[in-house]
Image (cartoon, rainbow, N blue to C red):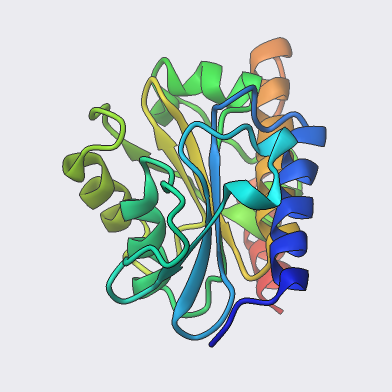
Amino acid sequence: MQIETSQIDMFVAAAHKAGRYGLVTCSSGNLSWRASVDMVLLSASRSWLAELTPGQVVVCELGSGNVLNDVKPTVESSFHLGILRIRPEVNVVLHFQSPYATAIACGEPEQYNYNVIIEVPAYIGAPAVVEYLPPGSQGLADAVINAFADGTTQMAFLKNHGLVTIGKNFDDAIQKAVFFELACQILLTHPDAKVLDPAAVDNLKALGQA
């Protein structure tokens, strides 16, 4: 299937939206989209999502990973493609570095209960945690793919690196990242913040799945 110019434009617009919401800084972060059954769009290596251009959009085959338009993909393309292969309901993968969530990623993310706002249990659930591994390495790719392999995980910390989230479309993935950043901001700026009680969490999870 040939990629249409309109699809490139949609991808670029989504990358810019991630930048407007403060999810990426300069060349941090990367984005992928299942544009068809067997074709994926990826942000180019070292590109700035907030200023992405059509010439910085990579077209590749999902199965083989072969690049079809001679643009070098993000160094994290292996985990993007891997998640899309194992999660057929997922169409977008976003690797981001929003300030508060990344600050927590540089410590011990496991120590926090993120259910301080209703959107976390409704849309995200418990985040996975991936130990530090070199960026772009196969080890990191394997660990990130494994973190999403249970079929339910929506968010993962990459220690001392950033976060990865997924979505059925661009807005779904961006919304999860923005809501999670808000929860992390609350936790880091309001030490006495109260988490939702378990019954409320269970109810919100059910609403999110409805």
Q: Where is residue 95 in the image (x, y as percent from the top left)?
A: 52, 42
| 151 displayed left or right of 208 | left
Q: Seen in the image, is 140 located left or right of residue 114?
A: left
Which percent across, then down, holds residue 54?
A: 68, 52
In this view, the residue in front, 30 or 5, is 5
The residue closer to the viewer here, 107 or 50, is 50
From the viewer's perspective, is residue 135 above or below residue 173? Answer: above
Which residue is situated farthest in the front direction here?
70
Place of residue 209 in the rendered image (x, y in percent of width and height, measured from the top left):
66, 74
Location of the C terminus by quadrant is bottom right
Residue found at x 52% / y 78%? 89
Q: Residue at x 31, y 53 (%)?
A: 78
Residue pictured at 42% horizontal, 48% vertical: 73
Residue 97 in sight here:
yes
Residue 111 placement: quadrant: top left
Residue drawn at (49%, 31%), measured in percent from left and top? 46
Viewer can see residue 95: no
Q: Residue furthest left?
A: 139
Q: Is residue 5 left or right of residue 108?
A: right
Q: Is residue 82 above or below residue 210?
A: above
The image shows residue 117 at horizontal and vertical percentages of 75, 40
Q: How many labels does the image show?
A: 0
Drawn side of residue 108 relative to residue 56, left or right: left
